[in-house]
Image: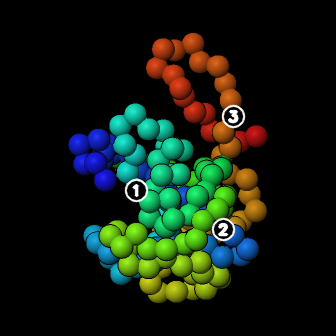
Amino acid sequence: MNRENTNWQQSVTGVVIREGKVLLARHTYGAGKGRLIVPGGYVEQGETPQEAVRREIWEETGVRAEPGPVIGIRFNMNDWYVAFAAEYVEGQAHSDGDENSEVVWMDTEEALARDDVPDLTKKLIACAVSGREGLCQIPFQSSERHAPYSFYGVR
């Protein structure tokens, strides 16, 4: 991670579900140390949230995934965290040997029942498997100079 290029107030995650299993990584540091969480991380300067979630999933797990609907947003006065449902594209899951000690495909029901899966991760998995569409990206034309913008809404 290029610490100079990191936007510490913006972070993303992607919940990748494939054949009834969710992609989880056992974190090696911070509040999530030793726990199985969905892959994600900080947005880099000049990067969209969608680009960041693709990069983070790839770097942490060796899996390529495409972000889909927004299934959750966590924010406070200082920062925000956007969670995408993400579709598996390709790749063999493996640890990055740094931020995580293992990467697994786990049955979603098992993940929801385990003590080493934090509550927020369980809530995100439940949102991803709920069958509801979430907030979907809706194209629009902006007249402002600061494009590109992304708009997510209910269809």
The image quarter containing residue 113 is bottom right
As helix, strand or loop, the secondary structure at mark 3 comes to loop
Please state the horizontal and vertical placement of residue 68, each as a whole percent of the image.
65, 50
Please state the horizontal and vertical placement of residue 76, each as a whole percent of the image.
37, 49
Q: CA distance from mark 1 to mark 2?
A: 18 Å
Q: Is residue 31 visible?
A: no
As helix, strand or loop, the secondary structure at mark 2 comes to strand
The residue tagged 1 is 41
Q: CA distance from mark 3 to mark 2?
A: 23 Å
Please report contact status of discs 3 and 1: CB closer than 8 Å, yes or no: no
- Which amino acid type is marked by label 2? Ile
In the image shown, does 110 or 86 lie closer to the viewer?
86
- Which amino acid type is marked by label 3? Ile
The image quarter containing residue 139 is top right
Please state the horizontal and vertical placement of residue 142, each as a whole percent of the image.
59, 18
Q: Residue at x 51, y 44 (%)?
A: 51
Q: Earlier in the sequence, mark 3 or mark 2?
A: 2
Please report contact status of discs 3 and 2: CB closer than 8 Å, yes or no: no
Q: Residue at x 76, y 62 (%)?
A: 131
Q: CA distance from mark 3 to mark 1?
A: 24 Å
The residue tagged 2 is 17
The residue tagged 3 is 138
Circle 3 crowding by C-alpha within 10 Å: few under 14, some 14–19, many from 20: few
Please state the horizontal and vertical placement of residue 124, each as a whole percent of the image.
56, 65
Q: Nearer the viewer, mark 3 or mark 1?
A: 1
Q: Earlier in the sequence, mark 3 or mark 1?
A: 1
Please report contact status of discs 1 and 2: CB closer than 8 Å, yes or no: no
